[in-house]
Image: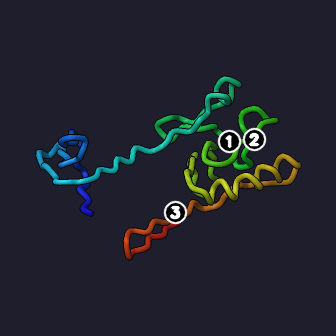
Amino acid sequence: VRFHFGARLTEITGQDGMVLAARTDDGEEHPAHDVLAAIGAAPRSALAEAAGLEMAERAHGGGIAVDASLRTSDPHIYAAGDVAAVAHPLLGVRLRVEHWANALNSGPAAARAMLGQEVTYDRVPYFFSDQYDLGLEYSG
């Protein structure tokens, strides 16, 4: 595996349905048998948009805009998980996190808020990745 930072994929070449190489905008041709293109995900917020809820800016990840208690622009509707763009009180930005831990923790927090409890969803985002024999973890 090789990483080519800053290069953009321009073409995948092949023959008889098999990949032979990937070309990048720096003029390089990289022999390959397989290509993985990771293009991200978009939140499914059409229902919330149709309901007139405030949306977060797409430039910042989109999603349903919620306050620190996971309440939307309609005081009777809450959003949690990776569709919620939380006004994060510790980081000072609206943040939408696509990670299973966010879904695991924000749902119960939204439920507590719905029950009238004082809730501030301020968990610091956590991510990890295993790359062969190396493990990466970070918070923030």
- For the residues bearing labels 2 and 1, Cβ distance under 8 angstroms: yes
Which residue lies under the disc numbered 1?
Answer: 66
Q: Is disc 3 surrounded by few (<14), some (14 to 19) or many (20+) residues within 10 Å?
A: some
Between tags 1 and 3, which lies in front?
3
68 relative to 36 in the view: left or right: right
Q: Earlier in the sequence, mark 1 or mark 3?
A: 1
24 relative to 102 in the view: left or right: left
The residue type indicated by label 2 comes to Tyr
- Residue 115 x %, y %: 88, 49
43 relative to 32 in the view: left or right: right
Residue 124 falls in which quadrant of the image? bottom right
Q: Is disc 2 surrounded by few (<14), some (14 to 19) or many (20+) residues within 10 Å?
A: many
Q: Nearer the viewer, residue 79 or 40?
A: 40
Residue shown at 25% from the left, 55% from the top = 5
- At mark 2, the secondary structure is loop
Question: Which numbered dot is residue 136?
Answer: none
Residue 64 falls in which quadrant of the image? top right
Q: Nearer the viewer, residue 140 or 3?
A: 3
- Residue 2 x %, y %: 24, 62
- For the residues bearing labels 3 and 2, Cβ distance under 8 angstroms: no
As drawn, the residue found furthest toward the right would be: 115
Which residue lies under the disc numbered 3?
Answer: 127
The residue type indicated by label 1 comes to Val
Q: Earlier in the sequence, mark 3 or mark 2?
A: 2
As drawn, the residue found furthest toward the left would be: 27
- Residue 83 x %, y %: 61, 42
Which residue lies under the disc numbered 2?
Answer: 78
As drawn, the residue found furthest toward the front would be: 16
